[in-house]
Image (cartoon, rainbow, N blue to C red):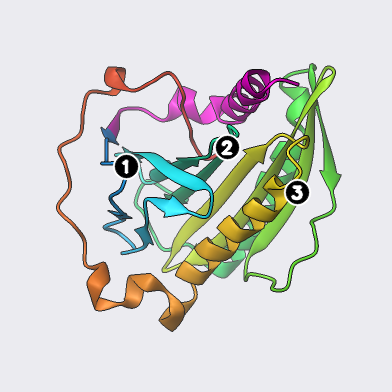
C-alpha cells in the first residue's frame, strides 16, 4: 500500500469515527499555533509540546460546548494521527466522578466495536495490546478496523484528570511496523502529564501562554476531529 493511500485510509476512517460528534458539535474556535510552540490548556493547565516522539502538533480545536471540549491533534510523516481530547460529560462542565468515568469507558469501547451498525463496510476486531514496561492509569484498548481489503489500527486511552476526561485516539496503518511503539510512547507521555507531581503541568514554567484569536472555522482544512 502506498504512503498516500495509507494516509488517505487513516484520515477517512478516523474521520468516520468522529462523524456523529461533528454533526452535533456546534460552533468551534480554531486556534492555529506556530509549529514549534507548546499549547497550554487553560482548564487543566496541561502542557502539550510541539513534538512528542515522532508526532508533530498540527492544530488545536476548542468547542464552546464543554461536552466536545478541546482537541489537540498530532501527526507524523507516515500519516499516523494522534488526537488528545479534554472534555466533560455535561454542558455545565460538572466534575466527572469515577463511576461516570468507568461507565463512559465501557460505552466508548462498545461504540467502537459496533461501528459496523453505522457503516456496514466497516468491521472492528479487538486486538491485543503490545507488551509495555508500564501500565498507565486509565482505560486502554486496541482495535483493528477493516474497510474492505484495507485496514487500520486504532488505540484508545481514557483517563480522569481534575474532573475532566482526557482521551487519546491514535490511528495508524498496521503495515508500519514501528508505529505501535510510537503509539505506546505517545500514550506514556500523556499518562505522565496526568501523573500528579511528575506532570509538567505542575511546574512553574508551565504557566499558560497568551492565546491567539480564533480564526473562522471555514478557514480550517477539511479534516475534523471530535470525541467519538
In the rendered image, the vertical position of residue 42 relative to residue 71, given as above or below: below
User: In the picture, residue 2 is in which quadrant?
Assistant: top right
Callout 1: SS: loop
Q: Residues within 10 Å of mark 2 (few under 14, many from 20)?
A: many
Q: Earlier in the sequence, mark 3 or mark 2?
A: 3
Where residue 20 appears, as percent x and y from the top left, is: 55, 27
Identify the image quadrant of residue 103.
bottom right
Magenta region: 1-29
State whether residue 222 is above or below residue 105.
above
The label on residue 35 is 1
The residue under the point 59% across, 45% down is: 169
Q: Which residue is mark 2?
A: 228
Residue depicted at 57% across the width and 68% down the height: 98
Judged from the image, the secondary structure of the residue bearing numbered disc 2 is loop
Alpha carbon distance from label 3 to label 2 = 15 Å
Q: Residue at x 27, y 41 (%)?
A: 33
**Considering the numbered disc 3 on the image, is that residue within a helix, a strand or a loop?**
strand
Q: Nearer the viewer, mark 1 or mark 3?
A: 1
Main SS class of the magenta portion in the image? helix
Q: Which residue is mark 3?
A: 142
Query: Marks 1/3: CA distance?
Result: 29 Å
- Foreground mark, 3 or 2, reads 3
Q: Is residue 115 left or right of residue 228?
A: right
Q: Residue at x 83, y 45 (%)?
A: 126
Which residue is at the front of the view, 117 or 35? 35
In terms of sequence position, does the residue under pointer 1 or pointer 2 come before the other?
1
Task: Locate residue 207, reporting x and y percent.
Answer: 21, 67
N-term mark: 1 or 3: 1
Is residue 174 magenta-colored?
no
Amino acid at each position: 500500500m502506498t504512503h498516500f493511500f495509507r494516509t488517505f485510509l487513516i484520515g477517512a476512517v478516523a474521520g468516520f469515527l468522529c462523524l456523529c460528534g461533528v454533526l452535533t458539535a456546534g460552533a468551534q474556535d480554531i486556534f492555529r499555533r506556530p509549529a514549534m510552540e507548546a499549547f497550554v490548556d487553560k482548564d487543566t493547565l496541561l502542557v502539550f509540546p510541539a513534538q512528542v516522539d515522532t508526532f508533530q502538533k498540527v492544530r488545536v480545536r476548542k468547542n464552546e460546548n464543554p461536552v466536545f471540549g478541546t482537541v489537540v491533534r498530532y501527526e507524523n510523516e507516515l500519516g499516523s494521527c494522534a488526537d488528545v481530547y479534554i472534555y466533560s460529560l455535561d454542558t455545565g462542565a460538572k466534575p466527572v466522578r469515577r463511576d461516570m468515568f468507568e461507565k463512559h469507558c465501557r460505552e466508548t469501547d462498545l461504540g467502537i466495536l459496533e461501528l459496523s451498525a453505522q457503516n456496514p463496510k466497516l468491521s472492528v476486531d479487538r486486538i491485543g495490546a503490545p507488551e509495555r514496561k508500564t501500565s498507565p492509569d486509565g482505560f486502554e484498548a486496541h482495535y483493528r478496523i477493516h474497510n474492505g481489503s484495507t485496514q487500520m489500527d486504532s488505540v484508545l486511552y481514557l483517563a480522569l484528570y481534575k474532573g475532566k476526561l482526557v482521551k487519546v485516539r491514535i490511528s495508524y496503518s498496521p503495515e508500519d511496523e514501528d508505529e505501535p511503539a510510537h503509539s505506546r510512547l505517545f500514550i506514556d507521555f500523556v499518562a505522565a502529564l496526568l501523573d500528579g507531581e511528575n506532570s509538567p503541568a505542575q511546574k512553574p514554567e508551565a504557566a499558560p501562554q497568551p492565546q491567539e484569536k480564533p480564526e473562522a472555522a471555514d478557514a480550517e482544512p477539511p479534516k475534523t476531529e471530535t470525541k467519538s
